[in-house]
Image (cartoon, coloured by chain):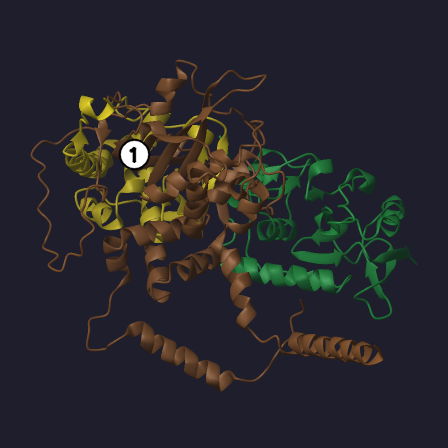
Chain colours: A green, B yellow, C brown
Amino acid sequence: MMDVRLPGFANNLESQRCFRAILQAMSHPGLIITLDINLTPPAPLSVATAAALLTLVDATVRVAMPENTGAGVDWLVFHTGARIAAAAEADFIVASAPPSLANLYPGTDEEPEAGATLILELPGFGCGPLFRLTGPGIESNIMLQAPLDAAFIADWRMNDALAPRGIDLLLCAGASIVGLPRSVTIEEV
Amino acid sequence: MLDDLSGRAPKTIAARQAWLGVLARASLEEMRSNLADAPDLPDYTILRGPETGMAMARGRIGGGGAAFNLGEMTITRCSIRDATGRVGHGYAAGRDDAKVELIARLDAVLQNAATFAAFHAAIIVPLAKTRADRWAAIEAQAAQTNVNFFTLATMRT
Amino acid sequence: MAYVAVKGGEVAIGAAHAWLARVRRGDPSLPQIDAVQIEAQLGRAVDRVMAEGALYDRHLAALAILQAQGDLIEAAFLLRAYRTTLPRLIDTEPVDTGAMRLHRRISAIFKDLPGGQRLGPTTDYTHRLLDFERPEPEPVITTIARTASPAPRATDLLGAEALLEPDPSGTGEPADLTMAALGFPAGRDLRLQTLARGDEGFLLALGYSTQRGYGNTHPFVGELRVGEVAVAITPPELGFAIEIGDITLTECQMVNQFAGSKAVPPQFTRGYGLCFGHADRRAIAMALVDRSMRAEDLGEDVKAPAQNAEFVLSHCDNVEATGFVEHLKLPHHVDFQSALETIRAMRRDAEASDARL
């Protein structure tokens, strides 16, 4: 039987507020935005990841969350109707250890918007290496300190070759998010 | 899934399907008027909803073949956890939030062996009778229009 | 064709809306009608708007009819627009029309239909005379309460003899017009969904055309039934099916002569109609057109409009059709200016070449 003991958003306004925050994050790459939300998601989902999923996922969306056990999956399916899928077929992939981006769905040239979004759970921002971000939505450059490893940054360059296809990234830590659309260049400084 | 303590409690999925089917077809007013004869409902917290959306109603090609999407219908759902820790789910066609929230609360107490009998007798039994009476009245009218057509032999000669 | 933005006119538009509201209300000395009265007393209009709006909700359809001043296409448009504000929560289990609580069930091919024929609340045997008196109807006589017994579909009876093609089977997810734009070739699932919400007048005219020889399909109404069916869903958190209520549907089983082909012996083929509400005309027309569009699959010559699935399905939606047709009245000043320049230039060229001759 499904574990449905934890509530989701209290009302539609919370979902609308989160949507607005995610829109801000994706249109201002590298900007740390803290969600003003009261949510108790099942472990190990962070508040930010849980809020993003509640906001963006419905019954037409495929989600892969390989690191989550029953409670997290049940919670997501109960509140959103999400279809649980393998990472390669998913619209959203939730992970704390980044999977190889080449294994995720990048969309097609006709429908690049169908490319997957990776929701990467991080222990926090303001720790780890310092990165310079450039690209559309950033006037000159912006600095972001986040615990992303070099292998992932190398993997991210794959997006350049795929354009307009590609994988979008939403970094989540606690109640904070950072949006990194596929068009952003990430360099360690 | 359901309590099985006293022997009087519903043991089967069929029992829960039956009361949820009865409640979904009742109006909020009908449910509330029967609540007067029932014990007080426990406090509760909302887990989901009440929210209105759509269900895609499906048919079958030719009536018995592969499924196809016929068109959508409005549906409202609500899930609650009551003070005893039981989770109740309410679903009904239409857009009545208050009704579906009450269905969820009743679904929770009906799963409880200690409260099943009282709520079943006060609410489900009379609502099931209301439903049966309504269907019987329609059937009685419909049956009066049953017809036998006779072929006139001369028409074909 | 290009669209050009215009600005201005706010005051006039506001005044037009205010006048529209007064016209909608009518003579203020007369009582205002309410959506609940439309729901109760204009049931066939409600059924049509639910079908073409592709959303089963009697009260919303009644509200739309009231707002649209009885313009049923506009009402369907309002319902379609409203549905976009609602999330899709779940798909239902396929309804079982064989278990329908029958209000009406007739067969044009079986006189002694097992389960019996039942007229229901029909206008079939009324004189089409305007009734200026409209007396109160006779009260219901319900001295004998009865329990309905479901009746088998008439086509299941013919099918047992193998003279009738069986229902097409399949277990995959059906195509969904609300999630992906109409594409071709369209499977029977997509066709039926499109027809179920199609314009009744368009379906009627196409069905009529098949009877008049434009793709003759020799149709018989195997069965027409109207009644209530239970709708069930299986929520993931429960894992078993529960009923959420009942909806009224009309189903038509059309039976058509088929000469047979190399692979298939002569038999009866079928067209299927299923729609929201009590709507004989819509269901029969839908079944005619469904069968007609199967011409290519059955190896028949495709010559008539009703046999051309792409033509039928692309043009049967009255919300799409009215949008494109009616948009012509909106400002096209710049387009027309450009067309005017073109015509003037062509005329100058023609005059110049005349002068040279």
Q: Is residue C93 visible?
A: no
Q: In the rendered view, does C123 fall on the left or right side of A183?
A: left
Residue, far top: C161
Q: Nearer the viewer, residue B99 or C90?
A: C90
Q: Position of residue C210 (x, y in %)?
A: 45, 39
Q: Residue at x 42, y 62 (%)?
A: C74
Secondary structure found at label 1: helix
In the rendered view, would you say B156 is above or below C121? above
Rendered residue at 81%/42% (across/down): A101
The answer to whether residue C139 is visible is yes
Give the total of numbered labels: 1
Q: Residue at x 31, y 47 (%)?
A: B102
Estimate the x, y position of residue B128 in percent, counting from the top left. 22, 35
| Subunit of label 1 | B
- Name the residue located 18 percent from the left edge and 25 percent from the top edge: B150
Residue C122: x and y, percent? 23, 42
Q: Left or right of A185: which side holds C106?
A: left
Vertical position of residue A150 compared to residue C135: above or below: above
Image quadrant in which the N terminus of chain C is located: bottom right
Residue A20 vs residue C20, the one in the foreground: C20
Front residue of this view, candidates C112 and C136: C112
Percent across and percent down for residue A177 are 70, 57
Identify the image quadrant of residue C277.
top left
**Image height of C160 relative to B28, above or below:** above
Q: Which residue is mark 1?
A: B19
| Vertical relation: C67 (above or below) B72 | below
